[in-house]
Image: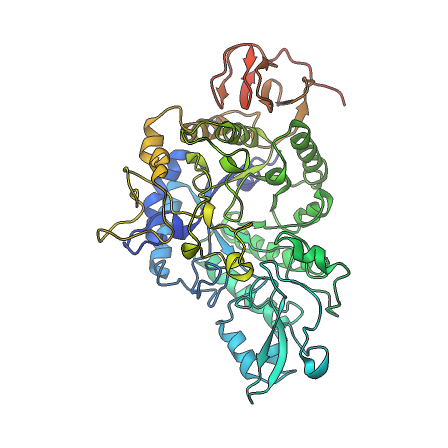
Amino acid sequence: MNRHHWWRDAVIYQVYVRSFLDSTGDGIGDLAGVRAGLPYLKKLGVDGIWLSPFYPSPQHDHGYDVADYTGVDPVFGDLAEFDLLVDAARRLGVKVLLDIVPNHCSSEHPWFRAALDAAPGSPERARFHFADGRGPDGAEPPNNWHAMFGGPAWTRITEPDGRPGQWYLHMFTPEQPDWNWRDPQVAAEFDRILRFWLDRGVDGFRIDVAAGLFKHPELPDSPDPEADARTRDSVNPLAWNQPEVHDVWRHWRAVCEEYTARDGRERLLVGEVSVPTAREHARYVRPDELHQAFFFDLLGAPWDADAFRKVISEAMQDIAGTGSTVTWVLNNHDQVRTVTRYGEPAPDGSGLGPARARAAALLMLALPGAAYIYQGEELGLPEVVDLPDDVLTDPIFRRTGSRARIRDGCRVPLPWSGQASPFGFTSGAEGVRPWLPQPEWFAEHATDRALADTRSSWHLYRDGLQLRSALNQLGEGTLRWLDTQPGVLAFTRGDDLVCAVNFGTAPVPAPAAGAPLLASGPCPPGTLPGSTAAWWIDGSLKPRTD
């Protein structure tokens, strides 16, 4: 057991900065708002926070198009405010992770602007993927790759002399040109960036598109271009998961360990790793690479006991088998909120979605390893599915014209208090509107109401986090599956702690005796109701042997 490694069983809260809390009254959340919300997060019981990008950016993809990796966009504050936030978090014992975006930058980044002004074959263009087009006069893209947010992955430029010129690669939007990590200047620049923020006291980094960075050196056509175009979550094997990317993570891990050796504070690297199998995922968390990588299979699993058991078992076998721990997630800023994903709630707040989301949260907190919670999940927030077209900001909508897979609905600013928008989210001049409109029904999920209601999802999360911290059986370690009837998932942690989830709608006999320590809904002794999870202490259970 490596209990002294804080990150191995940490629970991290993802702060989507522009939607967390607005301190200036402009309708957009900011770093000072995050600082004001730290006591709330400390009370909830999380170990740290992950901040979405707040760097200077044209905001074509809400900060994931970075124009300056070592600054703060004025809409979010400045470096002095950032330093205050880190200091306040440290006094509360809350770790701070930054979101770093090494796969691509903004088309407004000075290096890309220099590349546009330079000639083909120049050192400036070598930092990106510039290539001549195909067909007559080079009018066709260099290959058939598709961008993750729709459309081709290439855009043609106009050369400084005014003629149609080369094409550049962007696996997301034209405003996000991909870096060429085969150029040593790129690696050196990100080494500088890491050290800049580590010197300012951060505890680590969430790494965007961590399986990207390197592309096939010959940039050949994809053998199945339609598969690459089907969804934004498709993985083009020529653009992702190239073997050279592991050398980058070994170097970054060494940089973090260099800082740890100076002051004893472990720094964390957690990767957004989208690869086809748990076995490939495990390669990213070998002892000398990333500390963690998000395991998205649980997030993508349907509400089904067999499906959940399969992905949990594969993660425990393939990822935990490396000596790392699994990093569990149920939601983030790119996904439909769990309440809605597990079943649309009824107008009165009932329905299967809320109960299933609560049960899934309790299940996740009982699993061995680390867990990440997306802001608002602790409030039981559903997805906002009826935002008008004219307020949508997601580049997926702009690129495709389709509302399918858009992400604005999970990014609506949080409700803090009151009965009407802005629900305490923004301060300042009366009438200032949040950057995305909040529906009237957000009042039912406001933080002040959640804190006052001991039956709320907030209290379930808080109680689960407190028990997770207090019980030796939770956090790291293994799990053992128990024999159950169909539709029920049950396992033990340690010698006698049991977690069970009833994925069905009808009650079943509880797999443990007595009243539960904690349950996601009403749970009489001896019974596990439908769409409910519970924890018990029961030393009489016999684990299954398979």
Image point (55%, 88%), residue name: 162
Classify residue 288 as left or right of residue 329: right
Eyeballing the image, is 185 above or below 98?
below
Number of disc labels: 0
Q: Residue 331: where, in percent of width, then height?
A: 53, 41
- Quadrant of res 454: top left
Q: Residue 5: where, in percent of width, then height?
A: 56, 40
Colouring scheme applied when the structure was drawn: rainbow
Eyeballing the image, is 383 above or below 148?
above
Q: From this viewpoint, which residue is outermost toward the bottom? A: 161
Eyeballing the image, is 248 above or below 405?
below
Residue in the foreground of this view, choosing between 211 and 140: 140
Q: Residue 298: where, in percent of width, then height?
A: 62, 37
- Quadrant of res 143: bottom right
Image point (58%, 20%), residue name: 497
Inspect this view and state whether residue 239 appears.
yes
Inspect this view and state whether residue 500 appears.
no
- Quadrant of res 185: bottom right
Residue in the foreground of this view, choosing between 477 and 439: 439
- The quadrant the N terminus occupies is top right
Q: Residue 538: where, in percent of width, then height?
A: 58, 13
Residue in the foreground of this view, choosing between 89 and 425: 425
